[in-house]
Image (spheres, helix red, strand yellow):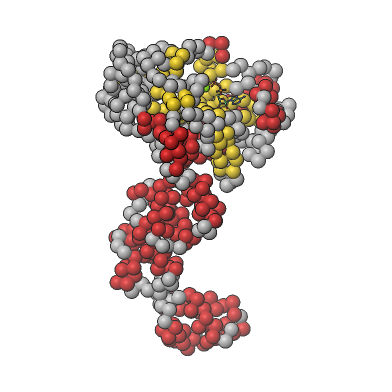
Amino acid sequence: MPLDDATHRYTLPGATGDWEIVVGLEVHAQVQSNAKLFSGASTEFGASPNTHVSLVDAAMPGMLPVINRHCVEQAVKTGLGLNARINRFSRFDRKNYFYPDLPQGYQISQFQFPIVGEGEIVCERDDGSRFTVGIERLHLEQDAGKSIHDLDPDATYVDLNRSGVALMEIVSRPHVRSPIEAAAYVRTLRTILRYLDTCGGDMEKGQMRADVNVSVCRPGQYEKFRETGDFSHLGTRCEIKNVNSLRFIMQAIEYEARRQIDIIEEGGKIEQQTRLFDANTGVTRAMRSKEEAHDYRYFPDPDLLPLELEESFVETIRVNLPELPEAKRKRFVEVLGLSEYDASVLVADKDRADYFEAVIAKGADGKLSANWVNNELFGRLNKEGLGITDSPASPEQIAGLVGLITSNVISGKIAKEVFEIVWTEGGDPEQIVESRGMKQVTDTGAIEKVVDELIAANPDQAEKVKVKPQTLGWFVGQVMKATGGKANPQAVNEILKKKLGV
Ligand code: ADP
Ligand code: MG
């Protein structure tokens, strides 16, 4: 794509000049909770249709919603994790509209007074560079049910299992400048939510989806917007509803930006619209225009009191926050001495970070452990299509292996063989090395003996080394071969140099 990620300039052949893309995202994240937002019904995924529906979720007349305290805690926790302001006062409003899978005839949401206000998160581009995205707000709301159109040619079925499930809508500022940055933002958000344990983040299970707002402008306009906060410097946006994978988010932005640029280049104007992304064709199409936009007639839900949070409630959550990816990455670099790259790779996935932490908790060297987890272990897991939580090799085993390397009991090369045994047969690395005689030979006497024999058997080669010291490698290879790779390479080199006088 002719979009330069460093300058954000979008250069299209035949265009009257460069363009830039501006994106803001509204991410709907399902709150990690066993029960729904206003009822005790289960949120279990994949249950038979309409088996997790309480009278409240089915909107039977006279039923009253009762707020789930855990969901409120989760929203506050998420807000704190997004470095955002927690609003001690917030309120639930009814957003009125008709849809067959919405039996109440309204969604309980938060409009004027959301539970979380402004925040920001640091995201990482593919090349490792970082950028900050402002968060406008986070509010709590209920999910709707699901209409199923493809089970019967003549009828639509309704499944209310999702009706009333708690969602957090996380609204970003329009600080995202390209498809790649949009994916990076959603990925970072997902990682943070997973660290916090406030959302599973599985887009395939509908635990996260995004409404993507896209506009285009000429170079310089975005900077004016950032300086003044005045949206009139930006182009008119279109909102693409319910995009449910990172790839689709990128495709939708790319398509939509091109569509808008083409319209403007041809002398047209962008009409503010809600659009849908068709994953099969990669195209966005109009759903409704601004004029047809819903008037939701928001008003405070009379069945629910405003939420007023005690300071101690917020503080308790704050002091119990887990370490978040950004802080963990810094610690890995500053305290453990890992490279920026290794640290980023480790923290990007909570399970991987947890695994690594379990390895070093056993006292294993940080840098070497990072290397083993990121390369050997992940290489192997990927090859077999396994996730880290299904790894046949445990953190204890990897720690044992790393320990054997750092204490010079085995070489890195032998360690790979031990790893193979651990992977396929299991067992304690130390015992494996002991029982199979894989220990590195550091006994100089034994190595000297091998070296003497080799020199005696290869006098020509020995003469050659004296003239051309770079051919010493041949002898090193022979010693390794003779010792089954178990000789300590450093000791071998020293002894050879001494004996051959180089
Ligand atoms: P609404 O209430 O209609 O959804 P908001 O002002 O809350 O509108 O904005 C929704 C999203 O649209 C936010 O993520 C915001 O960053 C984004 N947005 C607003 N203006 C633009 C624009 N000109 N270009 C791209 N995104 C925008
Ligand atoms: Mg919106």
Q: Quadrant of residue 202?
A: top left
- Quadrant in which the N terminus is drawn: top right
Relative to 343, say whether 124 is above or below: above
Residue at the farthest right position: 16
Identify the residue shown where x is 43% and y is 13%: 97
Comparing 203 with 52, the one in front is 52
Is 235 left or right of 308, judged from the image as shown?
right
329 lies left or right of 386: right
Confirm whether residue 315 shows in the render. Answer: yes
- Residue 340: x %, y % from top left: 55, 53
Q: Above or below — where is 315 with respect to 38?
A: below
At horizontal 32% and vertical 32% (from top left) the residue drawn is 34
| Quadrant of the image where one finds ligand 1 | top right
Residue 204 seen from this side: no
Closer to the camera in the image, 334 or 184:
334
Residue 449: which quarter of the image? bottom left
Q: Residue at x 59, y 80 (%)?
A: 469
Comparing 184 with 385, the one in front is 184
| Residue 195 vertical position relative to residue 460 in the rendered view, above or below | above
Location of the C terminus by quadrant is bottom right
Indicate the position of residue 372 as horizontal and vertical percent values: 44, 59
Q: Position of residue 238 (x, y in %)?
A: 57, 21
Residue at image point 63% right, 30% down: 21
